[in-house]
Amino acid sequence: MSKLTYAVTGVASGIGAELARVLKTQGHRVIGFDLHETHVNVDRFIPLDLDDMESIAAATRQLDEPLNGLCNNAGLPPRDGLEVTILQVNFLGTRAFTQRLRDHLLPAASILNMASRAGHGWRDGIDQVKRLAQLTRRDQLEDFVRTEAITATQCYNLSKEAIILWTIAETETMVARDIRVNSLSPGGVLTGIIGDFQRAFGDKMAKNVARAGRTGTAEEIAEIAAFVLSPASNWLKGEDIAIDGGMGAFNQSDLLDLKSLCLPKEVST
């Protein structure tokens, strides 16, 4: 496998740190972006605060080399008091960062956006996502949050719905540029911020994890992310891939009452 160059945001911890490790193990060059400085499994570190448009501009100006891929992994969990920041970092800042980095992406490059199972309600919230997508500045978000009357958890869900729909919306334009874009939707992953999700989603999350048997690991998500970024997945375009240990399937089966489709418990003779 030839040596490729990948940019990863949120590289200092969690899934981003594991993705950097996996990519380095595969022999690739990793340019890491984060608010917190790290040089672990990173060939080059560039400071980035997605909550600050000036920081986004400064970070992208520092990048002076072509990329084979970009993983937009950085994001904030649902946490009370951070409503505006969640929407800015998880969506508006990520979108602005990608726009500025787009011209650094080589032909056949791949963009991977980290979404979440929490974003899978986008069909019910599509109009709200469209209203959010019309905004371009952080100073517009406080009024948006107040007008929409949304909590931190709802802001998180909305930001991930926006990531999934933005990925879909960008697919044809990116394909015309010979760039692929996809999203991943992890669920129930054991990282340093899992407590935020346990508080936000409570019994619902606990029941899903219990049915799956355990939480996922950052390494498991990173391995799949590395594949989706790689040329090996070159025909995968515009897709959102859930990585949740079957949680989504459990819920769909319950909702659609699919038990009659299951294999019989005993084999007919």
Image (tube, grey):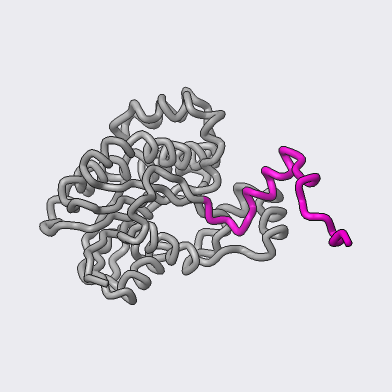
* Residue 22 location, quadrant: bottom left
Q: Could you tell me which quadrant the C terminus lies in?
A: bottom right
**Residue 63: image location, x then y, percent:** 15, 56
Q: Does the magenta portion include 60?
A: no
Asked whether residue 40 is in view, the answer is no
* Residue furthest to the right: 269
Image point 65% across, 65% down: which residue?
A: 214
Left or right of residue 265, residue 55 in this image: left
- Report how many numbered discs are placed on residues in the image: 0
Residue 244, placed above or below residue 181: below
x and y, in percent, of residue 156 in the image: 49, 42
Tell me: residue 26, above or below residue 53.
below
Q: Quadrant of residue 73?
A: bottom left
Location of the N terminus by quadrant is bottom left
What residue is shown at x 15% (from left), y 57% (from top)?
Answer: 66
130 left or right, relative to 125: left
Tell me, yes or no, whether the highlighted magenta stretch contains residue 258. Answer: yes
Along the viewing direction, whichever of 229 and 6 lies nearer the viewer: 229
Measured from the top left, where is residue 178 in percent x and y? 23, 46
Q: Residue at x 45, y 43 (%)?
A: 82
Q: Residue furthest left?
A: 64
- Determine the residue positioned at 27% across, 63% down: 32
* First to last magenta residue range: 242-269
Does residue 265 appear in this view? yes
Going by the image, does 10 lie left or right of 256? left
Residue 23 position within the rendered picture, expressed as x and y whole percent measured from the top left: 33, 69
For this view, does 188 lie left or right of residue 142? right
